[in-house]
Image (cartoon, rainbow, N blue to C red):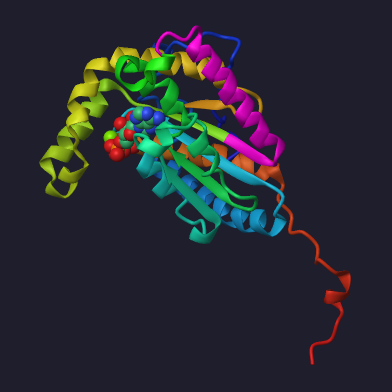
C-alpha cells in the first residue's frame, strides 16, 4: 500500500546507535490483521516476480539475513518466500567454518553460494559473521596470524564492500536485513523453546553463553551496519520483536526492490522460432 512508508536503509554517513531503534516498534503500521493481508499480497507478488526474473535471466536478487540467535532468520525465510518456486531459490546457511573453509579467505565459501542469474538467493548468516562473532570472540576465532593485524575490521569492511560491488557489477541486487530483537524477547523465545519438546533440538549451550556478550554483539553490529551499508548493498534495521512487523517490512522491501528491477522475459534465441510450423 502506497500510504505506508517503507523503512529507510542505514545511512553510512551517520553513527548507528541501536538504542535509537525500538525492536518492538509498530510505527506507521495499521493493525495486525490488515498488515497480515498485505504480507500475503506482497509474498504472492514476490513469487510472480521470481518467475519473471528467471525468464529475464540477466539479474539475481541476494537477500542477506543477520541477527542474534532466535531473531527469526528461519521464520523470515519461510514467510517472505513462501510463494516462490523452490527451483528459483537458493538458500545457504553459514555455520562455523569447516577445517577446509578455515584454510581459505573468509569470502571463499561465500562466493560459491552466490545465486545464479535468474534466481533469488538467501543467506541465512553470511560473510558478516566474520566481523560479528569473530570480532566478539577474536581471541578464539581469529587465526593466530591475524590477531595483531592493524585495522583488521576496517579492512574487512572494505573487502566486503568491494566483494559486494563485484556482485552488483554482475547483475546481482543485494539487500541486507538485520533482524533487531531485544534481549528480553530473545529470552522469551528461548524459554518458549525450553517449554516445547518439539523445539528442544533448537537449544544450544551457546544460546546461554552468548547472552553474556550481548553488548559486544550490539557494538559489532553498529560498526558493521555503518561501514557496510552502501548504495549497491544497503542494510535495513528491521524491528523484529513482533514477527508480523518483521515479515511485513522484509516482504515490502523485497517486493519493492524486485519491482524496481523490472524483470522482463528475454526474447526468443532465434526470432524464426516464433513463426515456424510444428509438424
Ligand atoms: P538459530 O538462530 O535458530 O540458533 P543459527 O543460525 O544460530 O540458528 P546454528 O547452527 O545454531 O544456527 O549456529 C550457527 C553458528 O555458526 C552461529 O553461532 C554462528 O555465529 C556460527 N558461525 C557462522 N559463521 C561463522 C564464522 N565465519 N566463524 C565462526 N562462527 C560462525
Ligand atoms: Mg544458534
Closer-to-camera residue (255/78): 78
Q: Position of residue 265 (x, y in %)?
A: 74, 59
Q: Position of residue 28 (x, y in %)?
A: 48, 27
Q: Main secondary structure of the magenta part?
A: helix
How far across and how far down the image is residue 163, in percent? Answer: 61, 29
Residue 228: which quarter of the image? top right
Q: Quadrant of the C terminus?
A: bottom right
Assess whether residue 43 is covered by the magenta stretch: no
Which quadrant does ligand 1 occupy?
top left
Can residue 64 be seen here? The reply is yes
Q: Is residue 112 above or below residue 3?
A: below
**Residue drawn where x is 44% and y is 21% of the image:** 131
Examine the rendering and report whether any part of residue 238 can be seen: no
Residue displayed at 55% across by 39% down = 111
Q: Quadrant of residue 179?
A: top left
Number of numbered discs present? 0
The spot of residue 175 in percent (x, y) is 56, 34
Tell me: 210 left or right of 129. left
Q: Which residues are magenta?
A: 147-174
Give the residue at x 43% y 32%.
Answer: 103
Which quarter shows the N terminus?
Answer: top right
In the image, is residue 220 above or below residue 42?
above
**Magenta segment includes 152:** yes
Q: Is residue 269 left or right of residue 41?
A: right
Q: Residue furthest bottom?
A: 279
Amino acid at each position: 500500500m502506497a500510504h505506508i512508508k517503507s523503512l529507510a536503509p542505514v545511512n553510512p554517513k551517520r553513527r548507528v546507535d541501536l538504542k535509537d531503534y525500538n525492536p518492538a516498534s509498530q510505527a506507521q503500521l495499521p493493525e495486525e490483521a490488515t498488515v497480515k493481508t498485505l504480507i500475503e499480497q506482497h509474498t504472492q507478488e514476490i513469487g510472480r516476480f521470481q518467475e519473471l526474473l528467471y525468464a529475464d535471466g540477466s539479474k539475481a536478487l541476494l537477500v542477506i539475513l543477520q541477527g542474534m540467535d532466535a531473531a527469526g532468520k528461519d521464520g523470515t525465510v519461510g514467510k517472505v518466500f513462501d510463494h516462490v518456486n523452490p527451483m528459483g531459490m537458493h538458500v545457504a546457511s553459514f555455520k562455523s567454518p569447516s577445517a577446509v573453509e578455515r584454510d581459505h579467505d573468509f569470502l571463499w565459501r561465500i562466493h560459491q553460494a552466490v545465486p545464479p542469474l535468474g534466481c533469488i538467493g538467501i543467506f541465512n548468516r553470511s560473510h558478516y559473521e566474520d566481523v560479528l562473532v569473530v570480532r566478539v570472540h577474536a581471541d578464539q576465532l581469529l587465526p593466530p596470524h591475524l590477531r595483531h593485524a592493524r585495522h583488521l575490521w576496517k579492512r574487512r569492511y572494505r573487502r566486503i564492500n568491494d566483494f559486494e560491488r563485484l556482485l552488483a557489477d554482475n547483475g546481482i541486487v543485494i539487500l541486507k536485513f538485520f533482524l533487531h530483537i531485544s534481549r528480553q524477547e530473545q529470552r522469551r523465545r528461548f524459554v518458549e523453546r525450553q517449554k516445547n519438546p518439539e523445539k528442544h533440538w533448537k537449544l544450544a549451550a551457546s544460546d546461554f553463553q552468548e547472552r553474556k556478550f550481548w553488548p559486544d554483539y550490539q557494538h559489532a553490529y553498529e560498526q558493521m551496519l555503518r561501514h557496510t551499508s552502501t548504495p549497491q548493498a544497503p542494510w535495513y534495521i528491521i524491528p523484529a520483536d513482533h514477527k508480523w512487523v518483521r515479515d511485513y517490512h522484509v516482504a515490502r522491501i523485497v517486493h519493492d526492490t524486485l519491482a524496481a528491477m523490472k524483470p522482463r522475459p528475454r526474447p526468443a534465441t532465434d526470432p524464426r522460432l516464433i513463426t515456424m510450423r510444428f509438424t
